[in-house]
Image (tube, rainbow, N blue to C red):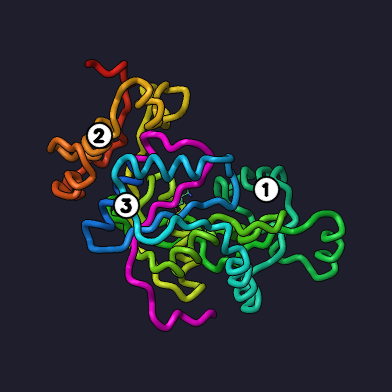
Amino acid sequence: MPRRPETSPAPAGRFAPSPSGDLHLGNLRTALAAWGFARATGRRFLLRVEDLDRVKQGAAERNVADLRSLGLDWDGPVDRQSTRIPLFLERVRTLTDAGLTYECFCTRREIHAAASAPHGIPGAYPGTCRNLSEAQRARRRTQRPPAIRLRADTPEFTVHDVFAGEYTGAVDDMVLVRTDGTPAYNLAVVVDDAEQGVDQVVRGDDLLPSAPRQAYLAGLLGHAVPEYAHVPLVLGPSGARLAKRDGAVTLRELQELGHTPGDVLGWLAASLGITHPVHTAADVLEHWDPSAWSREPAVFEPWGTAQG
Ligand code: GLU
């Protein structure tokens, strides 16, 4: 297993957007929560753009500008995950050397069919390529490039979450490197958090089911498991996860209607359960008490044009 850094970086929290478009109120709310958790506990706060895939031209710059408009700050330059591809692949080699990976030749369709068979765990990889012989692998390699999967030796793992408490979720043979050679999200997020001293992971609760497999992978790589706080999502008026169809949902769209970043910050804070009026990021810290926050998703009702 890799050596642990001799001097660990100071503890940190982070916000790690995928630059696939402008941040909507749900993403901004998660960013505010992550920033507040880090600052309220004396941690560094890092901004890491997760640009290994789903990148939309210009989105990262716009995301950064929006976070600044809300008054959030971070330590060090904005980080880009794509600068560390060799590091991620090196970690996979370490796992491979320990016999903890295998090549997978399954197509998406094959995985879907196998995972929806009776007794299949929904969405979990059923292990089809786990025990291929060397000859079988050599033949399959001539047909399509393999993905690299983890050879997990547990079906589940338990993490502790500030809001959800003890949470047990599935660990499967997750993809570490995709067929196109790109490191997969679950690998990159674990390696980056560990290397960057992130010991507090605050993000949307759609990622809670991924926390057990990430924590398990962190352990295999010799890293400590971070503290997790998965915050409820923001829903649109239909009850589905907030999306473009819900109208003006990004900072820029709301500004076009005449609302200020302070108005947006006030809504974000109120939606988390901060009952004091909030106009600046400093106000959020002044009234910081996540134990009083709502555990329910916030519902966004469309805003009209600002008055006055
Ligand atoms: N980049 C991921 C996303 O935007 C978040 C990763 C994380 O916070 O762990 O969905």
Residue name at image x 39 percent, y 52 percent? 15
Residue 282 horizontal side relative to residue 50, left or right = left
**Badge 1 element:** helix
Q: Vertically, is 251 above or below 143?
A: above
Image quadrant of residue 256?
Answer: top left
**Badge 3 element:** loop
Q: Earlier in the sequence, mark 2 or mark 1?
A: 1
How would you rate the neighbour count of disc 2 (Cα within 10 Å): few for under 14, some for 14-19, many for 20 or more?
some
> Where's residue 9, x and y in %?
37, 73
Q: Amino acid at mark 3?
A: Asp
Q: Magenta residues?
A: 1-28
Image quadrant of residue 109?
Answer: top right
Q: Gap between marks 3 and 2, in whole Å?
A: 15 Å
Residue behind mark 3: 73
Q: Amino acid at mark 2?
A: Gly
Residue behind mark 2: 262
Residue behind mark 1: 111
Residue 125 horizontal side relative to residue 298, left or right = right
> Where's residue 148, x and y in %?
67, 62
How would you rate the neighbour count of disc 1 (Cα within 10 Å): few for under 14, some for 14-19, many for 20 or more?
some
Residue name at image x 62 percent, y 53 percent? 125
How would you rate the neighbour count of disc 3 (Cα within 10 Å): few for under 14, some for 14-19, many for 20 or more?
some
187 vs 212, nearest the viewer: 187
